[in-house]
Amino acid sequence: MKLTQYLATGILLLGLVGLAVGGAFTYQGISKHNQLEEAMRVEHVTLGLENGELEGQVIDSLKEAEKAGDIIREHRRSIAPTYSDLLGSGRFNPEDPEQLSYAQAMNLETYLYLAVVAFGVVEATTGSGVFMVVTGLALIGTSLALYRLGKATA
């Protein structure tokens, strides 16, 4: 066996590994994306905004979660610019409606921004998987061309 045939075989194996791993990444990315959307639909988070883009709409995507998180952060900061400002020198009082609203807004804001991060990771995983599949196919094509080239020069 010639050096070109060994090289072609090695490149073919790398291409097959890239194809398999890329397929797994792509599958995981797509399935986790669907799982995130479904989990957010089950929670049925909507914003009761009037004349807003998200009015009455269930938030279940990266863009919607980010926009809703930004809106909630803006409303929360209208109560108090920071948590320290809200409390002053005291402690959290769950019986104070203003402090309770602020805490609930922080909780929902965190949930939405966590969803944004999760969707971002899922998109990166899917993109990496697609790139690996394309690279695997390119390596397989290169190995076949190299194998043919080796046979032609023999």
Image (cartoon, helix red, strand yellow):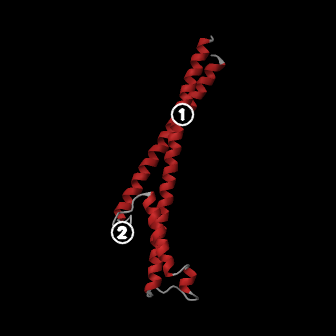
Q: Residue drawn 36% across and 69% down?
A: 51
Is residue 111 something that shows in the picture?
no
Looking at the image, residue 152 sits to the left or right of residue 64; the answer is right
* Tag 1 residue: 136
* Quadrant including the N terminus: top right
Residue 144's spot in the image, x, y percent? Answer: 55, 22
Residue pictured at 59% horizontal, 13% vertical = 151
Identify residue for label 2. Answer: 51
Q: Work out whether 33 lies above or below 10.
A: below
On the image, the x and y values in percent for residue 59 come to 39, 62
Q: Label 2 is placed on what type of residue?
A: Asn
Secondary-structure class at tag 2? loop
Q: Secondary structure at mark 1?
A: helix
Q: Residue at x 51, y 77 (%)?
A: 77
* Residue closest to the eye, 81 or 119: 81
Residue 105 occupies which quadrant of the picture? bottom left
Q: CA distance from mark 2 to mark 1?
A: 49 Å
**Quadrant placement of the C terminus:** top right
Q: Nearer the viewer, residue 69 or 148?
A: 69
Where residue 43 sits in the image (x, y, percent)? 36, 65
> Marks 2 and 1: CB-CB under 8 Å?
no
Whichever of labels 2 and 1 marks the residue nearer the N terminus, that label is: 2
Q: Residue furthest top?
A: 154
| Residue at image coords 53%, 40% | 131
> Is 152 left or right of 62, judged from the image as shown?
right
Say above or below: 127 vs 8.
Answer: below
Horizontal relation, residue 126 to residue 143: left or right: left
The outermost residue toward the right is 3
Q: Amino acid at mark 1?
A: Gly
